[in-house]
Amino acid sequence: MLTGERCLDEDHRIDYVFLRKGSGLAATASRAVFTEQDYGRVSDHFGYLMTFEPT
């Protein structure tokens, strides 16, 4: 299981993923999208597909 900062180990540029305190969710995985291999680049930022699970 991936948690918090571990999801971003590859150090790609990312803005923010906001989650309200007490939401009952935790990030369990992430994947960079809009890369050269996945849909193509759309800006100087990477998009991330995040997976959340109830805590």
Image (cartoon, rainbow, N blue to C red):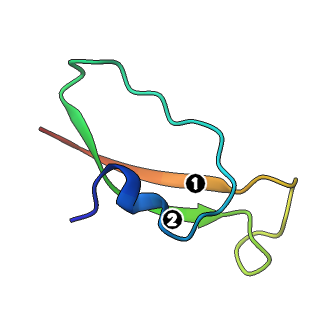
The quadrant holding residue 53 is top left
Disc 1 crowd, CA 10 A, few/some/many (<14, 14-19, 20+): some
Say what secondary structure mark 2 lies in.
Answer: strand
Q: Kindly give the residue lying farthest to the left in the view shown.
A: 55
**Is 11 situated above or below 54?**
below
**Is 39 situated above or below 20?**
below
The CA distance from mark 2 to mark 1 is 5 Å
Q: Tell me what residue is drawn at x 65 percent, y 48 percent.
A: 14
Q: Earlier in the sequence, mark 2 or mark 1?
A: 2
Q: Circles 2 and 1: CB distance less than 8 Å?
A: yes
Left or right placement of residue 49 versus residue 33 in this view: left
Q: Tell me what residue is drawn at x 28 percent, y 62 percent.
A: 2
Of residue 8 and residue 47, the one placed in the foreground of this image is 8
Count of labels in the image: 2
Of residue 14 and residue 23, the one placed in the foreground of this image is 14
Of residue 5 and residue 40, the one placed in the foreground of this image is 5
Of residue 38 and residue 18, the one placed in the foreground of this image is 18
The kind of residue tagged 2 is Arg
**Is 14 situated above or below 20?**
below
Left or right placement of residue 14 versus residue 45 in this view: left
Give how far across and how far down residue 33 sits, in percent.
65, 63
Say what secondary structure mark 1 lies in.
Answer: strand
Residue tagged 1: 48
Q: Tell me what residue is drawn at x 59 percent, y 64 percent.
A: 11
Q: Tell me what residue is drawn at x 73 percent, y 63 percent.
A: 34
The kind of residue tagged 1 is Tyr
The quadrant holding residue 10 is bottom right
Q: Report the quarter where the N terminus lies.
A: bottom left
Q: Kindly give the residue lying farthest to the bottom in the view shown.
A: 37
Disc 2 crowd, CA 10 A, few/some/many (<14, 14-19, 20+): few
Residue tagged 2: 31
Left or right placement of residue 41 versus residue 5 in this view: right
